[in-house]
Image (cartoon, grey):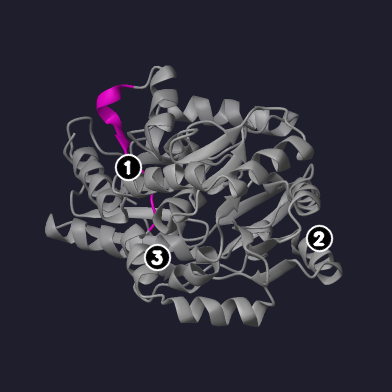
C-alpha cells in the first residue's frame, strides 16, 4: 500500500475486498449473486477466505469457490477460546473498501482497523451487532468491538435487530445497511415441489420410520443448540405419544451425543449433515422442527418447507429469531422452561392439526419476505453507498 491518502481523496471505487474465515455452504449462492450485482456497477469483488475454525470444521459444511482467494488461516487457543489469524493482508491495495466479519476472535481485524484509522483503507463491519454470550473474555471482546464499531466506515447489519443495536452505539444511521440475512429460499421451495409422495414413503422406509408424529432438527450440533435438553424432551414426547419419532440432520462437536442416543432408541434417527436441496426430503418428513437452543437461519428452512419451528426464548439466538413470530409462523416457549414443559408444548401441537395448519400458513406467508436475491441486492447497494460517500 502507498502513502496515506489526503482527506479529500476518494478511494478506488472499482474494488471491494471481503475477508471471511471460511465459506459455509449456505453462503455460496450469496457470494455469487453479490459478485454479479457489483459487476453491474463496475465494481470488482475479491473474496479472501481461509480454513474453517475448529468448531466450524466439525460441521463439515465449508466449500471453495474457484474465483475466490483461499489464503489460509491459523488458529491458536487462548484462555479456552479460539483466536484466528487470517492471511491475505498483502493482497490489499491503497484505498480499498474492506469488509470483515464483526468478531473479536479475528486477529486480522485489529490490523485492518489500524490501517483504516491511518487512512489507508476504508473498513466496514458485517455482523450481528452484539454478542449474545457473556464471559470475561467475550466482555473484553465486546468492548473492543463496540470501540471499533463506532469508527467503521460502513456497517452491514444482518437485519434490523442488528441495525438497531448499531444505532444505539451512536453510529450514524445513513451508514448502516440492513441486508436481511437469508439463504436461497427459492431453491428450497422449488426442491420441495419436486419431491413426490412416493419418494418420501421410500425415505421413511429406508430410515425405519413407522410413526406418524415425526419431528426434525437441522443444523450444527454444538453446545448452544442444547442437544442434551432436546434429547430429554424427546423422551417426554415419546412417553406421551408412542408413535413420536425424531430425525436429526446435521453434524458438529456434539454429534456423538445424538449418535449414541439413536443407537439405543429405534425412534431416534441421525442422518448426518445434508446441504442445500439434499436436506429438503428429510425436513419434509417432519410435522414440526424442534430447536430449543440457538436459532439462526434454520428458521427460513422451517418457513420454506412449512415445518413450523418450536424453540425457547433463550438470550443467545441469532438475529434471524426476529423473523419468528410466536403463534403465527412458529412457537417460542417461555424463557426458563424445562424439557418437560417444552415437550408438552410440542406434544399438544402434534395432536392439534388445526393449530399446526395455522402455523404452516404463517410459514408460507413469511417465506415470501426473505430471499437471497434481496439480500445480495441490499448488500451491493450498501457497497455502492460506502464507495460513493
Q: Which segment did they paint magenta?
A: 172-183
**313 or 163: nearer the eye?**
313
From the image, tell me which residue sits under label 1.
Answer: 179
Task: Evaluate whether residue 293 shows in this view.
Answer: no
Alpha carbons under labels 3 and 2: distance apart: 30 Å
The quadrant of the rendering that contains the C terminus is: top left
**75 or 211: nearer the eye?**
211
Q: Earlier in the sequence, mark 3 or mark 2?
A: 3
Percent position of residue 199, x then y: 48, 81
Q: Is residue 347 shown in magenta?
A: no
The residue at 56%/82% (across/down) is 202
Q: Earlier in the sequence, mark 1 or mark 3?
A: 3
11 to 141, vertically: above or below: below
From the image, tell me which residue sits under label 3.
Answer: 28
Per the image, label 2 sits on a secondary structure element best described as helix
Front tag of 3 and 2: 2
Q: Is residue 175 shown in magenta?
A: yes
Percent position of residue 306, x then y: 44, 54
299 to 28, vertically: above or below: above
- Determine which of the numbered discs, if any, sits on residue 257 in the image: 2
Per the image, label 3 sits on a secondary structure element best described as helix
Relative to 11, 219 lies left or right: right
The residue at 50%/33% (across/down) is 326
113 to 285, vertically: above or below: above
Per the image, label 1 sits on a secondary structure element best described as loop
Q: Residues within 10 Å of mark 2 (few under 14, many from 20)?
A: few
Task: Evaluate whether residue 357 shows in this view.
Answer: yes
Amino acid at each position: 500500500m502507498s502513502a496515506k491518502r489526503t482527506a479529500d481523496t476518494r478511494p478506488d471505487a472499482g474494488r471491494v475486498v471481503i475477508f471471511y474465515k471460511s465459506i459455509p455452504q449456505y453462503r455460496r449462492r450469496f457470494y455469487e449473486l453479490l459478485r454479479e450485482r457489483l459487476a453491474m456497477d463496475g465494481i470488482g469483488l475479491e473474496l479472501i477466505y481461509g480454513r474453517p475454525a475448529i468448531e466450524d470444521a466439525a460441521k463439515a459444511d465449508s466449500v471453495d469457490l474457484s474465483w475466490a482467494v483461499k489464503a489460509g488461516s491459523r488458529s491458536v487457543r487462548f484462555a479456552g477460546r479460539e483466536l484466528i489469524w487470517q492471511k491475505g493482508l498483502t493482497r490489499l491495495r491503497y484505498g480499498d473498501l474492506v469488509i470483515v466479519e464483526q468478531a473479536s476472535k479475528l486477529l486480522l481485524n485489529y490490523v485492518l482497523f489500524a490501517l483504516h484509522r491511518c487512512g489507508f483503507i476504508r473498513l466496514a463491519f458485517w455482523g450481528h451487532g452484539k454478542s449474545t454470550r457473556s464471559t470475561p473474555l467475550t466482555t473484553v471482546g465486546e468492548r473492543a468491538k463496540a470501540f471499533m464499531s463506532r469508527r467503521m466506515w460502513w456497517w452491514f447489519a444482518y437485519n434490523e435487530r442488528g441495525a438497531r443495536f448499531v444505532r444505539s452505539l451512536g453510529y450514524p444511521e445513513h451508514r448502516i445497511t440492513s441486508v436481511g440475512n437469508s439463504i436461497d429460499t427459492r431453491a428450497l421451495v422449488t426442491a420441495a415441489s419436486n419431491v413426490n409422495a412416493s419418494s418420501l414413503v421410500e425415505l421413511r422406509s429406508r430410515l425405519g420410520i413407522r410413526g406418524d408424529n415425526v419431528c426434525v432438527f437441522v443444523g450444527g450440533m454444538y453446545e448452544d443448540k442444547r442437544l442434551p435438553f432436546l434429547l430429554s424432551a424427546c423422551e417426554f414426547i415419546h412417553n406421551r405419544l408412542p408413535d413420536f419419532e425424531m430425525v436429526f440432520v446435521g453434524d458438529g462437536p456434539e454429534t456423538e451425543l445424538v449418535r449414541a442416543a439413536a443407537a439405543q432408541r429405534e425412534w431416534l434417527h441421525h442422518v448426518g449433515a445434508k446441504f442445500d436441496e439434499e436436506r429438503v426430503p428429510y425436513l419434509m418428513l417432519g410435522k414440526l422442527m424442534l430447536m430449543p437452543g440457538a436459532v439462526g437461519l434454520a428458521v427460513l428452512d422451517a418457513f420454506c418447507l412449512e415445518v413450523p419451528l418450536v424453540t425457547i426464548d433463550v438470550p443467545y439466538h441469532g438475529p434471524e429469531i426476529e423473523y419468528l413470530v410466536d403463534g403465527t409462523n412458529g412457537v417460542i416457549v417461555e424463557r426458563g422452561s424445562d424439557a418437560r414443559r417444552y415437550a408438552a408444548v410440542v406434544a399438544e401441537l402434534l395432536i392439534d392439526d388445526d393449530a399446526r395448519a395455522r402455523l404452516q400458513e404463517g410459514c408460507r406467508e413469511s417465506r415470501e419476505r426473505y430471499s437471497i436475491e434481496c439480500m445480495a441486492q441490499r448488500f451491493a447497494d450498501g457497497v455502492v453507498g460506502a464507495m460513493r460517500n
